[in-house]
Amino acid sequence: MAEAATVAHHSRDLPNPPKIGGFVPFSSCDYPGELACVVFLAGCPWRCHYCHNPHLQARKQVPGVPVWAEILVWLEQRRGLLDAVVFCGGEPLAEKHLPAMLRDVQAMGFKAALHTGGAYPARLAHCLPYLDWVGFDVKTGFADYLQVTLVPRSGDPARTSLQQLIESGVAYECRTTIHPQLHDDAALLALTDTLAGLGVRDYALQRYRPQGVESALLGSNPLPAGYPAAETVAEIAGKFARFCVRND
Ligand code: SF4
């Protein structure tokens, strides 16, 4: 109920304002087919080996980054010039004001998008009515999330969130960042069986990039050639209506 009360107020006027960790004014690669700005929300309960934004794991406004009220003023001046606002992180669902922020962005005429791992399904449920598109990060098989996020049972909320997303009818893509230390070919085949069984139709494998990652487990080398095997990729491709492998 507290969440519903939050949505009733304009996100510009909220006490304890949203924690913004970064802001990119223009991006053409964070929401397929749309020119978007990207708002990085600070805070994440997980500690993935391959995290590129560890400075966004703490939930606090990053100095030198615009506050939300300033971003709203900026957006007012971009009506008709920008298609969408993408919220990423960190884990943007860690921001309790996110439903109100999404609602206000849509009310200004922008599409609203989210990049999430689904750590907080109850908050996702409040966000779904205000979302046009979601990029959903599936870390690995839901029983094995600890190996990637270092947080026990983190696959449980992720699975609940993905099921909610699928049932909502909001457009989405699932994606998995892959590394042979985390996902061998058999694990990728099992994971994609699970996703296809849940009804996922749009899926991407994202090859691990070592740049900016400090991980003793994953190291600083690019992925080996031949990972995953061509036959594995072909088999995965056959499970989804849309599929791609990304190098970044
Ligand atoms: S969920 Fe994202 S932000 Fe959080 S630790 Fe993992 S990669 Fe980093």
Image: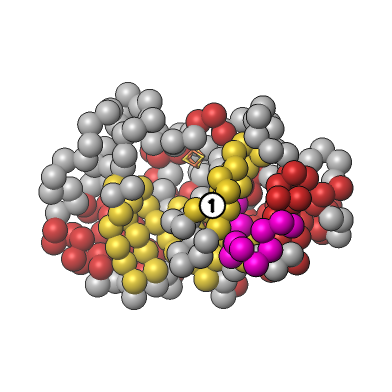
Which residue corresponds to mark 1?
Answer: 26
Q: Position of residue 223 (x, y in %)?
A: 21, 40
**Residue at (31%, 34%) from the top-left corner?**
210
**Residue at (80%, 52%) from the top-left corner?**
11
Identity of the amino acid at label 1? Phe
Q: Along the horizontal axis of the image, is 83 left or right of 207?
A: right
Q: Position of residue 76 (x, y in %)?
A: 74, 57
Q: Position of residue 140 (x, y in %)?
A: 38, 50
Q: Nearer the viewer, residue 156 or 88?
A: 88
Q: Nearer the viewer, residue 77 or 247?
A: 77
- Quarter of the picture containing the N terminus is bottom right
Q: Write the start and end of the magenta stretch as one range.
A: 76-87
Q: In the rendered image, which quarter is residue 148 located in?
A: top left
Q: In the rendered image, which quarter is residue 234 located in?
A: bottom left
**Residue at (14%, 54%) from the top-left corner?**
229
- Dot 1 surroundings within 10 Å: few (below 14), some, or many (20 or more)? some
Colour scheme of the picture: secondary structure
